Image (tube, helix red, strand yellow):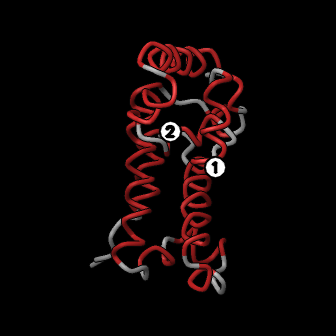
């Protein structure tokens, strides 16, 4: 009897991109690992990305607060792509593709965002605070168009 729990990050990638979840899974795990590495570099120092992180073993041994980072990021990805749609192009497309100039600096500085995928880790209320309601609504529509055109 197999009692192992499915990897929740992999499951999220499958929900978003059922045909080809690998690229998204790797990106989510990379991003979460990078966040945890910034907070607790000693925990990440001896981890092998391909073995420990990609298998999910790295996340299983984390303390609950650090697991919370993984959970929040994974939930953010699910909510973001449920809202705008999915395309692998999100993983590499620069912020300038859809984000207005007024949002670029805050997203890069505060949220370490570089690509459209990184927006998945930003809570929607932050877009309204940075851009205002009308500009935030316009951004969501632009992201939806991007997803549909890039697919």
Which residue, given by chain and number where applicable, does mark 2 sit on?
Answer: 17
Left or right: residue 106 compared with residue 128: right
**Residue at coordinates 38% horizontally, 59% vertically from top-left?**
71
Q: Residue 101, position in %: x, y?
A: 68, 23
Q: Which mark is residue 46?
A: none
Seen from the viewer's position, the closer of residues 12 and 66 is 66
In which quadrant will I find the N terminus? Answer: bottom left
Residue sitting nearer the eye, 116 or 85: 116
Q: Is residue 135 above or below residue 117?
A: above
Label 2 neighbour load within 10 Å: few <14, some 14-19, many 20+? some
Relative to 1, does residue 77 appear above or below in the rendering? above
Work out whether mark 1 precedes mark 2 in sequence or the reverse, and give the earlier one: 2
Q: Are dots 1 and 2 in contact, CB under 8 Å? A: no
Residue marked by disc 1: 112
Residue beneath the point at 43% across and 82% down: 61
Q: Please tell me which residue is depicted at 41% across the width and 45% down the height of the picture.
A: 76
Viewer-nearest of discs 1 and 2: 1
Task: State the separation of the CA atoms marked 1 and 2.
Answer: 24 Å
Quarter of the image that includes the C terminus: top right
Give x and y (percent) for residue 97: 70, 23
Dividing the picture into quadrants, the one containing residue 126 is top left
Element carrying mark 2: loop
Q: Nearer the viewer, residue 81 or 73?
A: 73
- Residue drawn at 50 percent across, 39 percent down: 17
Q: Residues within 10 Å of mark 1 (few under 14, many from 20)?
A: some
96 vs 118: above or below: above
Task: Pinpoint residue 93: horizontal percent, then vertical percent.
Answer: 71, 32
User: For this view, does 143 lie left or right of residue 125?
Assistant: right
For label 1, the SS is: loop
Residue 106, x across and y down, in percent: 61, 38
Q: Give the total of numbered labels.
A: 2
Residue 30 higher or lower than 143, as above or below: below
């Amino acid at each position: 009897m197999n009692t192992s729990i499915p990897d929740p990050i992999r499951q999220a990638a499958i929900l978003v991109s059922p045909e080809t979840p690998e690229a998204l899974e790797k990106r989510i795990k990379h991003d979460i690992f990078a966040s945890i590495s910034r907070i607790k570099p000693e925990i990440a120092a001896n981890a092998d990305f391909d073995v420990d992180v990609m298998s999910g073993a790295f996340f299983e041994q984390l303390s609950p607060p650090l697991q919370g980072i993984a959970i929040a990021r994974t939930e953010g990805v699910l909510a973001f792509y449920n809202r705008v749609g999915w395309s692998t192009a999100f993983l590499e497309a620069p912020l300038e593709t859809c984000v207005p100039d007024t949002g670029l600096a805050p997203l890069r500085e505060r949220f370490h965002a570089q690509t459209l995928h990184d927006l998945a880790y930003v809570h929607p209320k932050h877009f309204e605070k940075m851009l205002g309601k009308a500009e935030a609504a316009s951004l969501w529509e632009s992201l939806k168009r991007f997803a549909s055109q890039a697919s």
